[in-house]
Amino acid sequence: GEDVEQSLFLSVREGDSSVINCTYTDSSSTYLYWYKQEPGAGLQLLTYIFSNMDMKQDQRLTVLLNKKDKHLSLRIADTQTGDSAIYFCAETTGRRALTFGSGTRLQVQP
Amino acid sequence: GAVVSQHPSRVICKSGTSVKIECRSLDFQATTMFWYRQFPKQSLMLMATSNEGSKATYEQGVEKDKFLINHASLTLSTLTVTSAHPEDSSFYICSAPANTEAFFGQGTRLTVV
């Protein structure tokens, strides 16, 4: 079945860039997403990328996709304390539910 | 973007009782909705796919008689946790696809005491 993996924890200083990495196994994945989850809250869609793209930028967020290596990354520029949360990558072919990674806990130190 | 409303956001119930969670797509129609469960400090795991007008499809290991799903209309799916036990305490979240995106409800934190 589909599998999505992420590192569990990342700590950065305020103002630095954060890079959260994700790998997936399903070569037919069409849509890849990044979600943010704050403590006790639901999921907030941050951004998504189609599999025929290799980069997408949205303000402080940059998503890079290496389809050959099935590697997805999320870069947060000028990381702020408000960015502290758990970040999930997820993938789907569009016709089925999302498969989520385990989540990466981002800790931003002042 | 599209809005998915989930209710209630928090519920505490006694063991043995049933709890119903509603998931509504407010500004679009959803023939399919997905129900996920998230245990503390874990990822979201798909429980079942809710299909309007037909039976839900359950993932392996999810008891269909315990987690009753009804997709009564194109904008409403309900998940009923029957005869709840403390081990059912979890965060339940629904999702509805719209175009290329998946929109999530706010989630329901269920605590069974």
Image: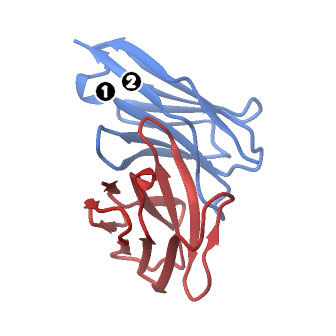
Q: Considering the numbered disc 1 on the image, is that residue within a helix, a strand or a loop? A: loop
Chain holding disc 1: A
- Where residue B87 appears, as percent x and y from the top left, is 45, 51
Along the line of sight, the residue nearer the viewer: B22 or A27: B22
Q: Nearer the viewer, residue B35 or A31?
A: B35
Q: Which residue is mark 1?
A: A84
* Host chain of mark 2: A
Judged left or right of residue A99, residue A86 is left
**Three-letter amino acid code at the position of disc 2:** Leu
Q: Do tags 1 and 2 sit on the same chain?
A: yes
Q: Could you tell me which secondary element the residue under label 2 belongs to?
A: strand
* Structural distance between the alpha carbons of marks 1 and 2: 5 Å
In the image, is residue B78 above or below residue A100?
Answer: below
Residue drawn at 45 percent across, 44 percent down: B39
Quick check: marks 1 and 2 in contact, CB under 8 Å?
yes
Amino acid, disc 1: Ser
**Which residue is disc 2 drawn over?**
A106
* Residue A110 spot, x, y in % from top left: 22, 12
Q: Is residue A64 toward the left or the right of residue B29 in the image?
A: right
- Residue plotted at (48% across, 38% down): B42
Q: Is residue B77 above or below residue A93?
A: below
The answer to which of marks 1 and 2 sits earlier in the sequence is 1
Q: In terms of image quadrants, where is residue A85? A: top left
Percent position of residue B12, x then y: 26, 59
Q: Which chain is blue?
A: A
Q: Is residue B65 above or below residue B54?
A: above
Residue A101 seen anywhere in this rendered image of the structure: yes
- Chain displayed in red: B
From this viewpoint, which residue is outermost toward the front? B16
Q: Which mark is residue B110?
A: none
Q: Is residue A77 visible?
A: no
How many numbered marks are there? 2
